[in-house]
Image (cartoon, helix red, strand yellow):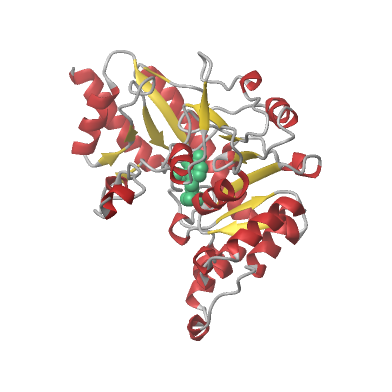
C-alpha cells in the first residue's frame, strides 16, 4: 500500500472565497461590514507586546469570565475555541462517538459532513420541508446525536424554541448541538434551555455579529459536564488554545454591549430594506433572520447572476448543488455596498 492510499481525503473548501484583492464588495462569507467595537482598537494599540513571549493562558480565563458574566452562566459552563469551526470540530470529536448515525438537515452548513467524514462518524441527513423548515419529528436516532444551525445556513430561516426543545427532548441519550452562528440578527437563542438539559451545547461566534472573523473567536455554552469533557479533549492539544491577543480583544468586545446592539440593529434594518428592493426586482427568498439573504430570481439563473456579479467585483456565494442551485446567498453589507449591489442588479435585470 502506498502512503497516498492511506491519506484521509476530504473535498477542500473553496479557497477563492477569501480573495486577497482590494476594492471588491465582499458579500460572500457573512462577515460584519463594520469595524469591531472601538475599545478593541484602543486596547490593541495599548497591548503589552512583551507578553507575547509567553504561552497564552490555556484556560482562556479573561474571555471565559467575560462571556460567563455576559450570558449569566458559570465560567465552568463556557468553552472558547479558535473560531466556532474549531469548537464544532472539537465537539464532533468529543461527543459524536457512537456507532449510530448523527443527524443534521439537508440543506445546512457545509462543514458538518466534512467533519463527520474526517472523524469517521456515521451520519444521516433529514430533508428540510418544502418551505425550507426543519421537520422536528425526523430528528430521532437512539444513541446518535444531532446538530443544526438556528437560524439555518444558507437559508437564514429560524426555528422556534419549541421546535428546538422538541428535538432535545427526543434525544436525551445523545448530545444535541445548536449552532447559533447567526442568532444575533433577530434569532431566538436556545441558551435558556442549557439549565434544563445537560445534553445541549449552544455554539456561537465572534465572526459575524462582533465583527472579529480575523481573530478567530468562537465559544459554546452548556452544562458543566459537557464543557468539562470538551476541556479534557482540548487540553490534550496545545494547538486548540486561543492566542493571547484574541483572548484579550475578545473580552473587550463582549464588554461593549451598546456597540453590539447598535451594529446588529443596523444590519437588520439594512437586511429588511434590501429584501423589499430585491422583491421588486423579481427575487424571492426565505424570510432570513441572519445577516444574509438566500435569493432566487424568477427568470434569470442564479449562476448567471453570480458570474456577472463577480465580473463586477461584487462577491456573493453560489453553490451548484441539488435544490439550492437556483439561489445565491448575499451577505448584508453596509447600506452603500447594498446600494451598489442593487444598482448593478437593476441594470442587469433590465438589460436582459
Ligand atoms: N456555523 C455556521 C452555520 C457558519 O455559517 C459558520 C461560518 N462559516 C461557522 C459556524 C463558523 O464560523 P467561525 O469559525 O468563523 O466562528
Q: Residue at x 37, y 37 (%)?
A: 338
User: What residue lies at 60% left-to-right and 71% top-to-bottom?
Assistant: 58
Q: Answer with left or right where residue 61 lies relative to residue 309.
A: right
Q: Position of residue 314 (x, y in %)?
A: 27, 39
- Disc tally is 0
Q: Is residue 232 left or right of residue 5?
A: right
Instruction: Give the percent coordinates (x, y) of residue 38.
Output: 53, 63
Residue 49 position within the rendered picture, expressed as x and y whole percent measured from the top left: 48, 82
Towards the viewer: 252 or 100 = 100
Q: Residue at x 59, y 51 (%)?
A: 260
Image quadrant occupied by the C terminus: top left
- Residue 289 seen in the figure: yes
Reply above or below: 54 against 14.
Answer: below
Q: Nearer the viewer, residue 46 or 246?
A: 246
Q: Position of residue 108 (x, y in %)?
A: 48, 31
Looking at this rendering, what residue extends furthest in the right direction? 196
- Above or below, comparing residue 108 to residue 259 in the picture: above
Q: Is residue 62 left or right of residue 306?
A: right
Residue at 34% from the left image edge and 45% from the top image edge: 9
Residue 255 in view (yes/no): no
Q: Quick one: which residue is furthest to the front in this view?
A: 1
Amino acid at each position: 500500500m502506498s502512503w497516498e492510499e492511506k491519506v484521509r481525503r476530504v473535498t477542500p473548501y473553496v479557497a477563492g472565497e477569501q480573495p486577497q484583492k482590494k476594492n471588491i464588495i465582499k458579500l460572500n462569507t457573512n462577515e460584519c461590514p463594520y469595524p469591531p467595537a472601538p475599545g478593541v482598537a484602543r486596547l490593541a494599540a495599548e497591548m503589552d507586546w512583551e507578553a507575547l513571549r509567553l504561552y497564552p493562558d490555556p484556560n482562556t480565563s479573561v474571555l471565559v469570565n467575560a462571556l460567563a458574566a455576559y450570558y449569566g452562566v458559570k465560567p465552568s459552563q463556557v468553552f472558547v475555541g479558535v473560531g466556532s469551526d474549531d469548537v464544532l470540530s472539537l465537539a464532533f470529536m468529543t461527543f459524536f462517538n457512537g456507532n449510530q448515525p448523527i443527524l443534521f438537515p439537508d440543506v445546512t452548513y457545509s462543514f458538518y459532513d466534512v467533519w463527520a467524514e474526517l472523524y469517521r462518524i456515521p451520519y444521516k441527513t433529514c430533508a428540510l420541508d418544502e418551505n425550507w423548515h426543519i421537520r422536528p419529528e425526523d430528528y430521532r436516532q437512539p444513541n446518535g446525536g444531532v446538530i443544526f444551525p438556528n437560524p439555518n445556513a444558507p437559508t437564514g430561516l429560524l426555528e422556534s424554541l419549541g421546535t428546538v426543545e422538541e428535538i432535545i427532548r427526543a434525544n436525551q441519550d445523545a448530545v444535541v448541538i445548536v449552532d447559533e452562528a447567526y442568532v444575533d440578527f433577530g434569532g431566538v437563542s436556545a441558551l435558556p434551555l442549557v439549565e434544563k438539559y445537560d445534553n445541549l451545547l449552544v455554539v456561537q461566534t465572534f465572526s459575524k455579529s462582533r465583527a472579529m472573523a480575523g481573530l478567530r473567536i468562537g465559544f459554546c455554552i452548556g452544562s458543566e459536564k459537557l464543557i468539562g469533557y470538551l476541556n479534557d479533549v482540548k487540553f490534550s492539544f496545545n494547538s486548540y488554545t486561543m492566542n493571547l491577543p484574541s483572548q484579550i480583544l475578545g473580552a473587550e468586545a463582549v464588554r461593549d454591549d451598546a456597540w453590539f446592539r447598535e451594529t446588529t440593529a443596523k444590519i437588520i434594518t439594512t437586511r429588511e430594506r434590501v429584501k423589499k428592493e430585491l422583491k421588486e426586482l423579481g427575487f424571492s427568498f426565505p424570510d432570513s433572520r441572519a445577516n444574509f439573504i438566500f435569493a432566487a430570481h424568477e427568470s434569470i439563473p442564479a449562476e448567471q447572476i453570480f458570474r456577472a456579479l463577480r465580473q463586477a467585483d461584487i462577491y456573493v456565494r453560489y453553490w451548484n448543488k441539488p435544490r439550492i442551485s437556483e439561489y445565491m446567498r448575499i451577505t448584508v453589507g453596509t447600506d452603500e455596498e447594498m446600494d451598489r449591489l442593487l444598482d448593478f442588479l437593476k441594470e442587469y435585470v433590465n438589460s436582459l
